[in-house]
Image (tube, rainbow, N blue to C red):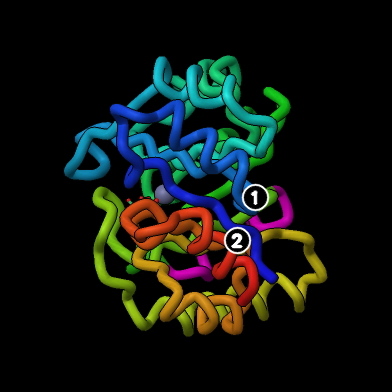
Amino acid sequence: MALIAPSLLASNFLKLQEECTMLNESEADWFHLDVMDGRFVPNISFGLPVIEQITKTTEKLCDVHLMILEPEKYAEAFKEAGANMLTIHLEVCPHLHRNIEQIKSLGMQAGVALNPHTPIILLQDILQDIDMVLIMSVNPGFGGQKFIPHSLKKIAALRKMIDDAKLNVKIEVDGGISLQNAKQVINAGADVLVAGSSIFKSADPKETIRQLKQL
Ligand code: DX5
Ligand code: ZN
C-alpha cells in the first residue's frame, strides 16, 4: 500500500476550501503542493500566500514541490507557510548538500526531485542525507501529461540503490499517475504516489483516492 499525495494543482481554485475538506475527509495521506516560477519550468502556479491558507486547513503532511530556481531564498518562508516536507530539484542546486542542510535545520523533511532525464546515479552522495527522492514521470510544469514509461525502470533501480544502502529514503513518483498505471508504479518500488488530474477530474475524487489506496 502506497501513500497517496493528491496534487492540488488540478483542484478547483475557486473552491479551494471545499477541495481541502474533501481531501481531509478522504483517505489521502499527504497534500502535494506544486510551486512553479516560470523560469525553471515553463509555467507559473501558486505560491506562499495560497500555501499558507491551504496548510491551515489540514493536519495532513504538506508536501511542497518547488519547481523554482534558487530555492534556498525561500526555504524559510515555506516553513513559515506550513510546509512539512520541502522538495527541491537537483537540476537547480549546485550546492545541493547545503540546501538540504538548510531545509533540515528549519525542521522540515527534505526531498530531492529528478527530471525524467536526470540519472539516479547523481544521488549517490546525497542519498544518506535526505528523506525522499521525487522521480518526475513527466516533464515538470503541467498537470495532465502522459506518464513516461521509462520511469518504471528508474524507480526500480532507485529502489535497489536505497535498499542496498539500507537507507530509509522514500520514493515519490509524480506525473501522469492514474488507476490504470498506479499498480505498476507501486510494484516498481514507489512509496508515495502523487496524482492530480486522475483524482480531481474524476467523477468521485474521494472514491478514486480510496481505490488508489487499495492497490
Ligand atoms: C507537474 C507537477 C505534478 C502535477 C501532477 O509538474 O509536479 O505534481 O500536478 O499532475 P498529474 O497527476 O495530472 O500528472
Ligand atoms: Zn509535483
**x, y percent for residue 41:** 24, 44
Q: Could you tell me if the residues under marks 2 and 1 are in contact, i.e. CB atoms within 8 Å?
A: yes
Q: Is residue 121 magenta?
A: yes
Residue 114 at least partly seen: no
- Magenta extent: 119-129
Q: Is residue 21 above or below residue 6?
A: above
Q: Secondary structure at mark 2?
A: strand
- List x then y, in percent, for residue 199: 41, 57
Residue 21 higher or lower than 135, as above or below:
above
Residue lying at 46% horizontally and 24% vertically, measured from the top left: 51
Disc tally is: 2
Which residue is identified by label 1?
29
Label 1 element class: loop
- CB at mark 1 closer than 8 A to ligand 2? no
Mark carried by residue 192:
2
Residue 54 can be seen in this image: yes
Three-letter amino acid code at the position of disc 2: Val
